[in-house]
Image: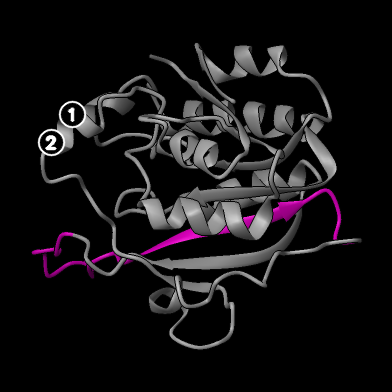
Amino acid sequence: MKTKIIGNVNEKLDEIENNSIDLIFTSPPYWKGFEYESYFNSYLQYIEFCNIWIKKIKNKLKKNGFFLLNIANDSETTIKAFELLNICTNNYWKLCDTIIWNCYNRQPCNSNRRLTNQTEFIFLFRHNSSNMKINKNIDLEKYKNIFETKNVGNIWKIPFQINKKSNLKKELSSKFGHSGWPKILCELVIDLFSNENDTILDCFCGNFILGDIAEKKKRNIIGIDLN
């Protein structure tokens, strides 16, 4: 079952039952730089906003559930990912791993002042590290180009794909949603960290590509977005 909730995440999270979510996979707005992120008047306001939703989701996740936070630094906020990591640990999330998403086909940086950013972080959290079980018996043949070895590692080589039939502005049209993940990334996260009939939450679901894939994989999925 796929459910999309329209509204501010810090209000709509209150509508979700505590201890009901098996997997949270989400990517918050990058703060500023695109039209859809102009809601925040300052970086401090953005950080305060993140502190609220990160604290709220802790009660929603089951004790053995996983919380995966996808976030990247950029040229203006070069420590943003680490500040959100700090917020999570301050709210007693246990950091179990740091996945490096090597999105190697990003648009080149033409400035001599900085390098082209080809990485994003996926921080893997749980309430605690006890009884942790990742479904590492996945179809490695399907994901062989991601890992490049027989190990299910924490460096994922996945191109950052934008739908060529639509322009970037259209894909970024959601105020509180991310721009959309590659399908293979969604499939991998679902396969590794959930099972059939589990319930997944995306707090900033944007075009809700995660919802479409979760439904095909027989998971329940809840997405929240502002519009």
Residue type at the position of mark 2? Ser
> Quick one: SS at disc 2?
loop
To which quarter of the image does residue 163 belong?
top left
Up/down of 106 relative to 190, above or below:
below
Tag 2 residue: 166
Q: Give the range drawn in magenta.
A: 107-130
User: Taking the image as drawn, is residue 79 in sight?
Assistant: no
Q: Residue at x 30, y 23 (%)?
A: 38
Q: Describe residue 128's horizontal placement relative to residue 163 as left or right.
A: right
Q: Is residue 159 above or below residue 24?
A: below
Magenta-colored stretch includes residue 123: yes
- Type of secondary structure dominating the magenta stretch: loop
The residue located at (25%, 36%) in the rendering is 33
Which quadrant of the figure has residue 192?
bottom right
Q: Residue at x 23, y 33 (%)?
A: 171
Instruction: Say if 36 sits above or below 84 in the image.
Output: above
Which color scheme is applied?
one colour
Q: Which of the pair 224/138 is nearer the observer? A: 138
